[in-house]
Amino acid sequence: MAIIKPFKAYRPADNADKIACPPYDVISSEEARKMAEGNPISFLHIDKPEIDLPVGTDLYDSSVYAKGRENLDKFIAEGILKEEKKPCLYIYAQTMDGRTQYGIVAATSTEEYDKGLIRKHELTRKDKEEDRTRHIQTLEATTGPVFLTYPDNKKINEIVADICKKEPIYNFTTEDKITHKVWIIADDAVISMLEEEFKNIPLLYVADGHHRSASAANNARQKRAQNPNHTGGESYNYFLSVIFPASHLYIMAYNRLVKDLNGLTDEAFFTVLKQSFEIEKTSLQVPPARHQFCMYLDKTWYLLTAKPTSFDASDPVGSLDVSILQNKVLAPLLGIQDPRIDKRISFVGGIRGTKELMKEVDSGEYKLAFSMYPTSIEELMKVADQNLIMPPKSTWFEPKLRSGLLIYKY
């Protein structure tokens, strides 16, 4: 079963469009400073509080977390953020390029996360987990929502559709032309219906936000150990999530840039590449199907089709396109054994398109690029269901959830 819990959100009293900001982990400190310049109510002052400290401040210094808490307290004291009068659920809808995804905003269970009922598919980095855990504990809040998904449920879809016939409490379009809408679910009967219906959902899946969910679970474990009267009902046992039906989600490719050919000549590289791939010059810049890749080298695009003998179709991880590329090209030919730490590879979210790949290669900064076919939500769930882990940078979800619209305070 999936537990969802209504909560008394802290949310914008007004000016939601000026408060809401991108997730903390998709922009740098420098980008955040520029974005928040002239906007004292940007939620970046809470999620990226280093922007209010001297440039060069260690991002993990205690002063950064203290500034985030100071700013959150200030936003609440000045009425920029207000507390809901009663525990509610919410609906958060995003429209991008004519496609809308509708998610239910709720508090979800760290216990279910620990039991594997909220399934994950990525490894997390300890330093990033510790950073968000400190942020949660200092602010006593989860400020950035975790992006969860579940197999479609007709009844839940019907309830959501009915609520969205009403006027939203927030409705604005951001600079990236994505429209954001939020509805409040305050009716106890409707909340109960959704809670009961989610009990029929056996599993939830982390689509995006592995470090946020892991950090919330870390926080709960620590609080539990410190509380001799722990009951399981405490607010720290839950974290802020937006839960979308799988059919609503759009996964974009996560493309690759590589610095060099690892000492190989172009001719030698193509010779060994042909052992695992059929290769042809192409006008395509995006692969048309699974197990195909578009490669850009010396101002020319090539279509690479993986030979059936180059991967195990029954292996849910090994048959992923990102795995085929890693196992047959990046590691054995180009010497990139660990793409998490190797400085010779960079990753480009599909939202930036293939022009970005061509620009970087044509500039000489990189030698070649790979345009990938997107990983599917079905592949993601299949990997998670077997408690397996995808290679790094396997999925890029768009649109990204904005922070600052709804905050879960402990």
Image: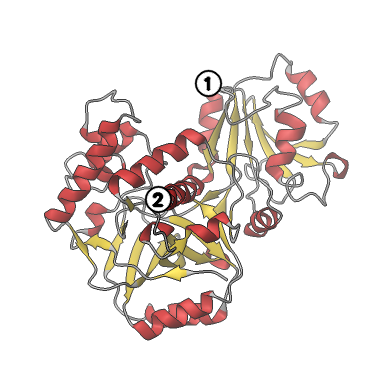
Judge depth for marks 1 and 2 and give the one in front: 2
Question: Which corner quadrant of the image does residue 276 belong to?
Answer: top right
Kindly check if marks 1 and 2 are in contact, taking CB atoms under 8 A apart as contact.
no
The residue that appears at 72% across and 27% down in the rendered structure is 331
Q: Nearer the viewer, residue 187 or 265?
A: 187
Quarter containing the N terminus:
bottom right
Q: Secondary structure at mark 1?
A: loop
Quarter containing the C terminus:
bottom left
Q: Position of residue 54 (x, y in %)?
A: 22, 26
Q: Is residue 249 visible?
A: no
According to the picture, the residue beneath numbered tag 1 turns out to be 365
Q: Is residue 30 above or below residue 262?
A: below
Mark 1 residue crowding within 10 angstroms, few (<14) / some (14–19) / many (20+): few
Q: Earlier in the sequence, mark 1 or mark 2?
A: 2
Q: Position of residue 183 (x, y in %)?
A: 33, 72
Q: Residue furthest left?
A: 78
Q: Is residue 25 visible?
A: yes
Q: Is residue 155 left or right of residue 82?
A: right
The residue that appears at 52% across and 36% down in the rendered structure is 125
Q: Is residue 161 above or below residue 58?
A: below
Which amino acid, by three-letter code, is at mark 2? Answer: Lys
Q: Is residue 345 above or below residue 293?
A: above
| Number of the label disc, if any, that sits on residue 223 | 2
C-alpha span from label 1 to label 2:
47 Å
Which amino acid, by three-letter code, is at mark 1? Answer: Glu
Q: Secondary structure at mark 2?
A: helix
The residue that appears at 74% across and 16% down in the rendered structure is 264
Q: Position of residue 56 (x, y in %)?
A: 29, 23
Q: Is residue 164 left or right of residue 396?
A: left
